[in-house]
Amino acid sequence: PKNYFIVFPGSRSSSRIWDTDYFIEVSNYIYKKYKLTAVICGGNGDMVYANNFINKYAHPFIDLTSKTSLPELLFIIKTASCLISVDTGSIHLAASVNCLTLGIFNGSQYGRFSPYPKEICSKIISFYPKQVREDVGKNNLSKYELICDIPYDKVTSQEVIDFLETNSIL
């Protein structure tokens, strides 16, 4: 479609999954406010997450899960209005083509993979659980140098929607 956003609901790691209903709630908001079509992307390993999204999403969408080459996926990301994903390769691909990205993070390896320096990509918006945001504010980051086990669902869909509501970024 001419005007679309990307939903990347999967991850190779089952511990890096954001609830399908959260993806749907944010996608519903984007569709209702901006009339953008959802384009679902991912690889073979993301099929179960893509199908969960597709089976519940009631607005127009195109499913490109496991149907693109890497160059095709980069073009699709580059021309999208935005991408929604957990911290997986899709965010790094989006950064490489300067695509607006709503990234859900749990704080693991804070400072290494996120947040992105503005000089590299100013369009990655990082959402972290409240505990991580508080620790960042206190400069208490040592516990995030490696992998942490905070569930991604500690970032709610409402936090993302509230951000979109108060910031005219799309």
Image (cartoon, rainbow, N blue to C red):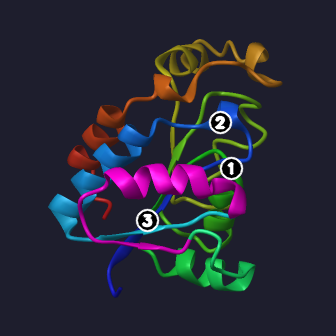
Question: Of label 2 and label 1, which has the lower sequence position?
Answer: 2
Helix, strand, or loop for circle 3? loop
- Is the residue 101 above or below the residue 34 in the image? above
Q: In terms of image quadrants, where is residue 142?
A: top right
Front residue of 135/72: it is 72
Q: Is residue 105 left or right of residue 3?
A: right
Q: Residue at x 57, y 19 (%)?
A: 132
Reply yes or no: does residue 45 show up in magenta: yes
Front residue of 22/163: it is 22
Q: Residue 141: x and y, percent?
A: 71, 18
Identify the residue position indicated by label 2 in the image.
16
Identify the residue position indicated by label 1 in the image.
88
For the magenta stretch, what is the residue range? Answer: 44-64
Q: Amino acid at mark 3?
A: Cys
- Is the residue 125 above or below the residue 82 in the image? above
Reply yes or no: does residue 72 show up in magenta: no
The mark tally for this picture is: 3
Could you tell me which quadrant the N terminus lies in?
bottom left
Using the image, tell me which numbered label, if any, was put on residue 82.
3
Q: Amino acid at mark 2?
A: Arg
Q: How would you rate the neighbour count of disc 3 (Cα within 10 Å): few for under 14, some for 14-19, many for 20 or more?
A: many
Q: CA distance from mark 3 to mark 1?
A: 15 Å
Q: What secondary structure do most residues of the magenta stretch adopt?
A: helix
Q: Is residue 61 left or right of residue 136?
A: left
Q: Amino acid at mark 1?
A: Thr
